[in-house]
Image (spheres, rainbow, N blue to C red):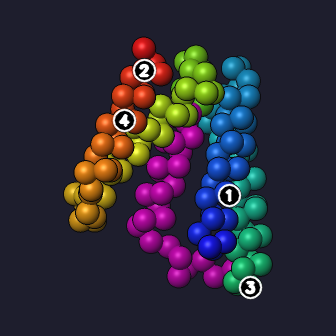
């Protein structure tokens, strides 16, 4: 059971810190300059964890298209959040709106790309999320 829960708790804690820090970036700080510092810190931490986890520094076996595209996606995600908060979104609404939209899109992607079975309950749940999104932002 713990194997299923600890990653979820890590995601929740990390997302709380992520949104608090992203909203706290000063308005006069260049978003991409800030992201350079963020990625340098992340690279140092990731390198240390990689070395501790594998005892190696051989990166060649880990280079693949998915990792490279993930780099582009992460930059877009983080720049998007910086600009979302700078545009005036509240921390209580901006992330929730983005994540509800993401969840609904991923249900469709799961069905179309990975041939996941989508139940009527999931469709109704996505509809309820969209209704909540409408109510929250109207």
Question: Residue 121, can we see it?
Answer: yes
Distance from label 4 to label 1 (Cα)? Answer: 26 Å
Determine contact: label 2, label 4, CB under 8 Å.
no
Q: Nearer the viewer, residue 11 or 86?
A: 11
Q: Which residue is mark 4?
A: 128
Mark 1 is surrounded, within 10 Å at the Cα level, by few (under 14), some (14 to 19) or many (20 or more) other residues, namely few
Q: Which residue is mark 2?
A: 135
For marks 3 and 4, the one nearer the N-term is 3
Q: Secondary structure at mark 2?
A: helix
Distance from label 2 to label 4 (Cα)? Answer: 10 Å
Which span of residues is magenta-colored? 57-81
| 136 over 102 or under it: above or below | above
For marks 2 and 4, the one nearer the N-term is 4
Question: Residue 36, can we see it?
Answer: no
Name the image quarter holding the C terminus.
top left
As drawn, the residue found furthest toward the top would be 138
Name the image quarter holding the N terminus.
bottom right
Identify the residue at horizontal 39%, vertical 23% (top origin). Answer: 134
Q: Secondary structure at mark 4?
A: helix
Distance from label 3 to label 1 (Cα)? Answer: 23 Å
Mark 3 is surrounded, within 10 Å at the Cα level, by few (under 14), some (14 to 19) or many (20 or more) other residues, namely few
Q: Is residue 73 magenta?
A: yes
For marks 3 and 1, the one nearer the N-term is 1
């Amino acid at each position: 059971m713990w194997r299923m829960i600890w990653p979820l708790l890590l995601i929740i804690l990390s997302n709380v810190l992520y949104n608090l820090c992203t909203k706290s970036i000063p308005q006069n700080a260049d978003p991409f300059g800030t992201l350079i510092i963020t990625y340098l810190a992340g690279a140092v931490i990731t390198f240390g964890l990689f070395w501790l986890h594998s005892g190696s520094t051989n990166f060649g076996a880990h280079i693949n298209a998915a990792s490279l595209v993930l780099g582009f996606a992460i930059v877009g995600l983080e720049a998007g959040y910086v600009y979302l908060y700078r545009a005036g979104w509240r921390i209580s609404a901006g992330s929730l709106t983005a994540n509800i939209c993401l969840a609904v899109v991923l249900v469709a992607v799961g069905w179309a790309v990975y041939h996941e079975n989508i139940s009527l309950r999931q469709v109704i749940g996505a509809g309820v999320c969209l209704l909540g999104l409408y109510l929250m932002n109207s």
